[in-house]
Amino acid sequence: MIRSLLFALAPAVTWIKVERPVFDLTGVVLGSFRLAGILLVLAVGLGLLLGAALVRSRRRARTTPLEAVSLQLHTRA
């Protein structure tokens, strides 16, 4: 009697069949190449922008307020 009561109070165990997970090595490799490509394009783009900004700032004539009133002694050929 007590034994049948314990079985009635015990929770029922339900089994659900789940398929075994599959490791997709090809997907991992292609995903890593895609990420590396995106980072490469981003690095090249930012490098070109920064390089162009540096070249542009170096080529720009730098004049100070003192140069406007000072004597210029260089000759133009």
Image (cartoon, grey):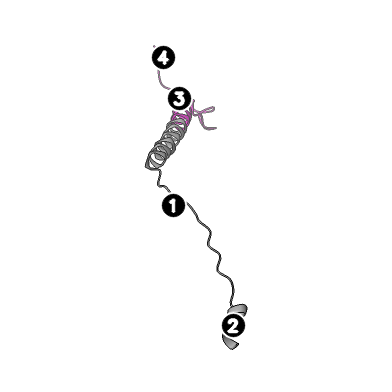
Q: CA distance from mark 1 to mark 3?
A: 64 Å
Q: Around disc 1, counting alpha carbons within 10 Å, would you say few (fewer than 14), some (14 to 19), or many (20 or more)?
A: few
**Residue type indicated by callout 4:** Arg
Q: CA distance from mark 2 to mark 4?
A: 112 Å
Of tags 4 and 1, the one toward the viewer is: 1
Magenta-tinted stretch = 48-77
Nearer-N-terminus badge (2/1): 2
Q: Which mark is residue 20?
A: 1
Of residue 18 and residue 59, the one placed in the foreground of this image is 18
Whole-percent x, y for residue 59 in the image: 45, 25
Q: Around disc 4, counting alpha carbons within 10 Å, would you say few (fewer than 14), some (14 to 19), or many (20 or more)?
A: few
Return the residue at label 2.
4
Of tags 3 and 4, the one toward the viewer is: 3
Q: CA distance from mark 3 to mark 4?
A: 19 Å
Q: Secondary structure at mark 3?
A: helix
> What is the quadrant of residue 26 in the picture?
top left
Does residue 67 lie above or below 23 as drawn?
above
**Residue type indicated by callout 1:** Arg
Say whether marks 2 and 4 touch (CB < 8 Å).
no
Nearer-N-terminus badge (3/4): 3
